[in-house]
Image (cartoon, rainbow, N blue to C red):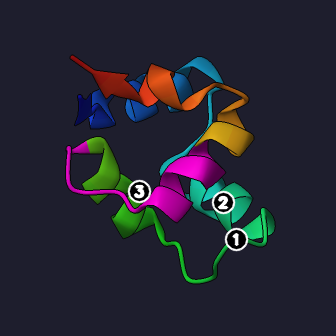
């Protein structure tokens, strides 16, 4: 399975959130600090996302981890 950054963008747009808003929401999960709009852009572009980031994304978007991966 491969991480699907495009799905992160799709979920973000579905909620009408900016990349900065997602970064703030990720930081608010308390799982880590320092998420920036640039990092969200990198994630959406398909760059690697850590397990902690994936868990936080699932929490923010209220989805299961399998939603963020493709076969």
Image quadrant occupied by the C terminus = top left
Q: Earlier in the sequence, mark 2 or mark 3?
A: 2
Q: Quadrant of residue 44?
A: top left
Describe residue 12's horizontal placement relative to residue 7 as left or right.
right
Label 1 neighbourhood size at 10 Å, few (<14), some (14-19), many (20+)?
few
| Magenta-highlighted residues | 45-57
Q: Disc 2 marks which residue?
A: 26
Q: Residue at x 29, y 31 (%)?
A: 4
Q: CA distance from mark 2 to mark 3?
A: 10 Å
Please state the horizontal and vertical placement of residue 58, each as a whole percent of the image: 63, 38
Pointer 2 with pointer 3, Cβ within 8 A? yes
Pointer 2 with pointer 1, Cβ within 8 A? yes
Q: Residue furthest front?
A: 1
Please state the horizontal and vertical placement of residue 10, each as a whole percent of the image: 43, 22
Is 50 a magenta residue? yes
Label 1 SS? loop
Q: Earlier in the sequence, mark 1 or mark 3?
A: 1
Please state the horizontal and vertical placement of residue 54, each as a whole percent of the image: 50, 49
Identify which residue, 58 or 7, lies in the foreground: 58
Q: Disc 1 marks which residue?
A: 31
Q: CA distance from mark 1 to mark 3?
A: 15 Å
Label 2 SS? helix
Label 3 SS? helix
- The disc placed on residue 55 is none
Please state the horizontal and vertical placement of residue 59, each as a whole percent of the image: 72, 42
Q: Nearer the viewer, mark 2 or mark 1?
A: 1
Describe residue 24's horizontal placement relative to residue 48 as left or right.
right
Classify 36 as above or below 10: below
Identify which residue, 20 or 58, lies in the foreground: 58
């Amino acid at each position: 399975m491969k991480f699907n950054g495009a799905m992160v963008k799709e979920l973000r747009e579905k909620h009408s959130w900016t990349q900065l808003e997602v970064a703030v929401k990720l930081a608010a999960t308390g799982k880590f600090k320092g998420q920036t709009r640039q990092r969200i852009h990198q994630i959406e572009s398909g760059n690697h996302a850590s397990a902690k980031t994936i868990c936080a994304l699932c929490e923010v978007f209220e989805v299961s981890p399998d939603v963020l991966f493709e076969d």
